[in-house]
Amino acid sequence: MKHSSKARFWYLLILALAAYLIFGRHVDFPYLNVSLFRVNVTVAVMGLAVTSIGIVFAIWARRLTLGSNWSGAVTIKHDHKLVQSGPYRIVRHPIYTGLLIAFTGSALQYGYLRSFLGVLIAGFGFWLKSLIEEQFMAQRFGDQYLVYRQKVHALVPFIF
Amino acid sequence: MPYPNIFHSVDSLRTLTMHLWQVLCVVWLVSALQYSPPW
């Protein structure tokens, strides 16, 4: 069971736009290139630390916990298990949370309005994809997933 | 013995961060091939 390639295309397009806004060297929208604060070495080190935490968190969720359950496309596999341990105790979509933390760290290092807009757009893309994933998970695991969804927030611990 | 100080400028820290993103991409690619090989 897989979600449509159209939905995947839009998701990847949203992520590409977010990455362009965060990392792009030449973004031709002057009003988006406004600096929100001065980036000095201290801020850049903080950005590096935040990015590292996010990347480690995403890899932890991806490799150590999810293992063969993972797929780039939203898919229910034959032997799919509902993982609720490790980072999945903290949020329901820890890979997206980790990537959002890492994007935020990188945005800190640039300090542009567009960089933080990119983080918001990435968050919107992850939220959309998580909605599709959760439909699949609810179908596959039923009440077990609904109980898990009530206990654990989707992307931001204790908030959202 | 002197060693390169990566914390001396914002640019070098940005470069180091980009390397971290590259590591993430490699880990992702390896995992994708490991669990869903295209062959």
Image (cartoon, rainbow, N blue to C red):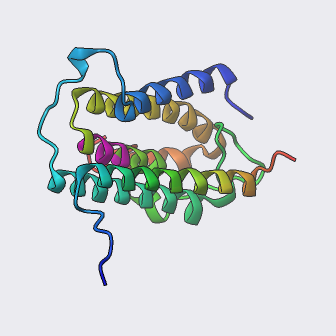
Give the percent coordinates (x, y) of residue B10: 24, 50
From the viewer's perspective, tell me whether residue A35 is left or right of residue A60: left
How many numbered badges does the structure rendering display?
Answer: 0
x then y, percent, for residue A12: 55, 28
User: In the image shown, does A70 or A47 lie closer to the viewer?
Assistant: A47
Q: Is residue A37 left or right of residue B3?
A: left
Residue at horizontal 46 percent and vertical 57 percent from the top: A88
Residue nearer the viewer, B35 or A149: B35
Highlighted range, magenta: A101-108
Residue A94 visible, this angle: yes
Could you say where residue A105 lies in the image, as x and y percent from the top left? 30, 48
| Residue A145, percent from left and from top | 53, 47
Looking at this view, name the residue that lies furthest to the front.
Answer: B1
Quadrant containing the C terminus of chain A in the rendered view: top left
Q: Is residue A151 visible?
A: no
Nearest the viewer among A138 and B24 is B24
| Among the 4 quarters of the image, the one containing residue A71 | top right
Q: Nearer the viewer, residue A10 or A144?
A: A10
Query: In the picture, residue A24 is in which quadrant?
Result: top left
The magenta stretch spans residue A154: no
- Compared to residue B33, the image places residue A31 above or below, namely above
Q: Residue at x 76, y 50 (%)?
A: B36
Tell me the quarter of the image containing the N terminus of chain A: top right
Name the image quarter holding residue B19.
bottom left
Magenta-span inclusion, residue A104:
yes
